[in-house]
Amino acid sequence: MDSFTQRVLDGDELAAARLMRLTDDRIKGYDAYMRNIWRHTGNAHVIGITGAPGAGKSTLVDALIYEYRSKGKTVGVVAIDPSSPFSGGAILGDRIRMSGHSNDSGVFIRSVATRGHLGGLSVSAMDIAAIMDAMGKDAVIIETVGVGQDEIEVAAVADSCVVVTVPGMGDDIQAIKAGILEIADIFVVNKADRDGVERTVKDLETMLSFTPRHRYNWTPPIIKTTASEKSGIDTLYERLEDHRSFAMSALKAEKQQARLLHAANGIIKERVFTELFHSQKLSEAIKNERNDPYTAVEKIWEQCIISTGN
Amino acid sequence: MAKVRILIAKPGLDGHDRGAKVIARTLRDAGFEVIYTGLRQTPEAIVSTAIQEDVDAIGVSILSGAHNTIFPKIVLLLKERGVNDIIVFGGGVIPDEDIPFLKSSGVSTIFTPGTSTEDVVKFVNENIKPKHAA
């Protein structure tokens, strides 16, 4: 093993932060390091936190970090925010709610922009979570943007998935439409000091009773929190630990396999799009085929198969 | 796809972050990734954040008058932690006569009131590149 990767595995912040940058920027040679990193993953409790923008995810993560630290556990956080589709820039502001941990060497927070990754969890975000796992963090929290496909994907790759909602976010039909009932291992009704919290909890309970049994014979608990007051966080921690014990015994191998597959799928897509079907090549092919996208793709596809000798 | 990453930091006791937010927004619209710390950060916290985020630059906004203490402290802490590839620049209500001292302490440039946002973007474009990018 090279000394740089060894430093990351030893938990060196400078080295880990640098590898995250190389990986996020896809700087030539980053994959050689990531090969070793991925082999050292699977030890952390990977927690996905998802829910609509404004539900209080970052504040909840902040409160959770305090809870984990009070139990002597180290924490990594991957905080994902959207890139502007127009400028490609991003304002990554999740840290504002987590600034109390800046001087705690047991906490590593990294902000990640979606960078044109349309929906879902980018390979970069997965890689960064993997680095935190490999550097020895006890818990790795992935905080998603909270819109679209990323909720479903974080549920697939996290050991435990927490769905955050708040009172008055819309009626029960909204929750059914959003498809959140099937993905949560734990529900959090945050901002529980607001009116309507009992109604929201009741709605969730009713809908869960109609939802086909949770895949793994686990009944998702519903927890009321007021993250800004750190209220209900101890209960959330306990339920997360319950789910961890459950997940570690019943599904750890399956979850780790799901993560690796998800990463592999993302890597394939990246390579196919950057190397074979990049937009300039596609545009030219479409033009050559007089605006027929099917034939354009077919032509490029055939060239690829011929060039790989199959 | 390498992107410039900039930490916008707000140290000290003043709570006026309109300027910091305008700059954050401007830099985002110019295509950069901006991490904003929020108010009342210590130099230690700013440097730790800059390291974890592995940014290319720290833009510090100060309106409290503590610039002659805080800027050199940030530069010093970066050095102490073995970081030599993060540029420090700043803005705020800073008297012209203090600027030579700040620059000699390792601050790249200082933007004073009245600076146009275009000037800030121009500075970033000309002076700050993503690390490692070819």
Image (cartoon, coloured by chain):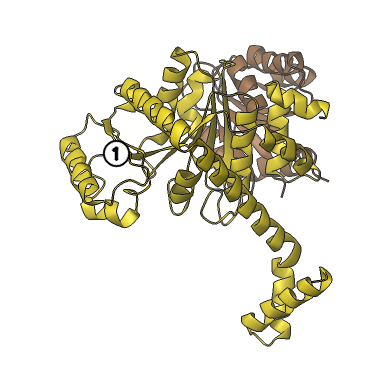
Chain colours: A yellow, B brown
Q: Residue furthest front?
A: A250
| B14 or A13: nearer the viewer | A13
Residue A65 position within the rendered picture, expressed as x and y whole percent measured from the top left: 46, 22
Residue B113 position within the rendered picture, expressed as x and y whole percent measured from the top left: 60, 32
| B9 or A305: nearer the viewer | A305
Q: Which residue is mark 1?
A: A219
A270 lies left or right of A61: right
Can residue A94 be seen from the camera position used here?
Answer: yes
Q: Residue at x 64, y 29 (%)?
A: A134
Residue B47 position within the rendered picture, expressed as x and y whole percent measured from the top left: 65, 20
Q: Amino acid at mark 1?
A: Thr
Can residue B16 be seen from the camera position used here?
Answer: no
A269 lies left or right of A216: right
Q: Residue at x 73, y 75 (%)?
A: A300
For disc 1, the neighbor class at 10 Å (few under 14, some 14 to 19, many from 20) is: some
Q: Residue at x 29, y 27 (%)?
A: A226
Res A218 quadrant in image: top left
B51 lies left or right of A95: right
Q: Residue at x 68, y 30 (%)?
A: A17
